[in-house]
Structure formats: structure tokens, C-alpha cells
Image (cartoon, helix red, strand yellow):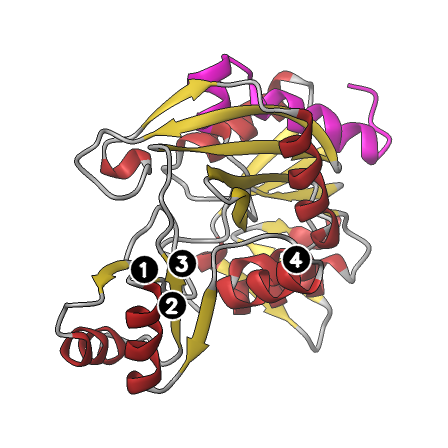
Amino acid sequence: MTTIGVVGIPSGWSSRMLTLAFEQLGCIAHQIDMAEVVVDLQNASAHYRDIDLTKLDAIVVKKIGTPYRPELLNRLAMLRYVGGQNVPIFSNPFNIKRVIDRLSCTVTLRLHDIPMPPTIVTEDIDRAAEAVRGFKKAVLKPLYTSKAQGMVLLNADDDLSKEISAYKNAGNELIYVQQMLDLPGHDLGIVFMGGEYVTCYARVGDQNSWNTTIRDGGRYQPVDPSDEIIALAKRAQAPFDLDFTCVDIAETNIGPIVFEVSAFGGFRGLWDARKIDAANLYANYVLKRIGHDA
């Protein structure tokens, strides 16, 4: 019988749904918490409790850990070793690494001429303050974060030296400064599987927060984007070669711009906005790729 490992958060809704989806398709599915994985490089083994990860038919990474932090790159390296033992991993840990770090993701997008909000990165507090003044309004974004956690909104007339110093002292050695553009109160999550467009949903803000995340009161709604936006999103996700991903796009007065490409995609958004069972879709995709007749 086909045996699948689902790397995720033990209490996470999407991790549980993905595990259940594989079980419903006739597989043995194990949820894997990376905090308990042991990799023995000398003996070429990797275990989660009593499960030999090198004997699995595939591993699917739904979530590498929470909160986002640089240490998660170590977990990806451990999975990369498991993949080197001929275990297919979705998505490839090396590819996930390229998007989980905000700066790495941004650099790749800009090198491929993907339109993004004007962005300046520096370790110098004075230069960062100068960037905020030039932008008039800006957001400081941690390199490892999700759902806008840890982001700081600044205006040109704020006490920038004080605010940015506090931000840097909180552990943000590199200061990522992005211009705050006029947005329509919503942004788009455009979902791809195996590089092919699946659907789109909107995150609509509740007008009490500058961002549209569900964590800060936003809600999901269905939306049908233009062919232009779908083409932009497809071009944005292509360099990362992820098996399941979501591209965050906003429509602005200067045209559509990309915020980021997600490492793991949005199961909840697909369900709440479209009633699409992303876990089932993804499980079928993985089993097809490994030659399992679901």
C-alpha cells in the first residue's frame, strides 16, 4: 500500500485535511512533525518516531513550522537529505527555501521583471529612514513571516530613527522597506498546482486594518481575475517550480503588482471562497506524479 508522509503542524487544519485526503484515496498517511525528526547522516537514515522516512513513497510538505523563522531552513535541509534517498518530496525543499525567505523571493521576482511595490533593503537605519521619507508611507517587513505578523507601517513624519531602531533591535538585522501603495481594500490569491492555474480568491479587508489578512479581520471571497492577471501570476510562480502555490497580487493605480509567492498555498482560501477541496486536489496530483492509481 502506498505510504505518504505529510509534513505539517499537528494541530493545523490544512495538515489534517491533507492527511485525511490521502487516507480517503486508499493510502497510509502519517502526519510528521519536523521537531521530532532525527536524521542520521552517517547511516543514511531519517526517522519520525518509529517511521523510516526513507521508506515512504512520497512526502508532502504542507507546513514546515510556525512561526516563520530562519531555523526552518534547517528543517528544509533535513528534508533535502531525505529526498536525496530517492523519496519524492512535494514541493522540493530547495524550491521552498527560495520563497520562504522574503528577500530571496523578492530578488528572484525582480530578476524576472515581475512588477512589485518599490522596495529598498539595507542594514543602515538612516538609509532605511530616508527610504520611508521618499516613499511617504512604507511597510517594514520581516524576512520570515506570514499573515503580516511583525510588519510595521510607517509614515514620513513618524519618529523614524526611533521606530526603525526598535524594529531592528527586535531581531530584524536587515531592514526590508516597501512602499505602501494605494490598494482597493482587497488583494488576490491566485492558486497554481504543477504550474497550472487552478482558481482565484480575494482577501477583503474589514477597513479597520491596513492589511487584508484573515488574522486581522479580512474575509475570503470568490473572484474571477482578468487574463492579464492570471498571466502575470503564472509568470511570477514559474521560476520557483513549486507543486502547489499561491501568488499574492494587488490591483493598483499603476497596474497589478505581486507581493509574494507562497511556499505552501492557501487551502483555507480555496475552501471558504470557492468550496474547492484543495487537499483532495493536491493528494490526487501527488499520487498521479508517483504513479499511484488513486
Disc 1: CA contacts within 10 A as few (<14), some (14-19) or many (>=20): some
The residue closer to the viewer here, 150 or 89, is 150
Q: 186 above or below 47?
A: above
In the rendered structure, find residue 177 and report the number of the disc placed on it. 2
Disc 4: CA contacts within 10 A as few (<14), some (14-19) or many (>=20): many
The amino acid on which the numbered mark 3 sits, given as a three-letter code, is: Tyr
What x and y, as percent, mark residue 77? 62, 67
Residue at 62 percent across and 24 percent down: it is: 226
Residue on which the image places disc 1: 139
Q: Which of pointers 4 and 1 lies earlier in the amino acid sequence?
A: 4
Q: Which of pointers 3 and 1 lies earlier in the amino acid sequence?
A: 3
- Depth check, mark 4 against mark 2: the one in front is 2
What x and y, as percent, mark residue 186? 38, 32
Residue contact at pointers 1 and 2, CB within 8 angstroms:
yes
Residue on which the image places disc 4: 93
Tell me how far mark 4 sits from mark 1, CA to CA. Answer: 29 Å
In the rendered structure, find residue 68 and report the number of the disc placed on it. 3
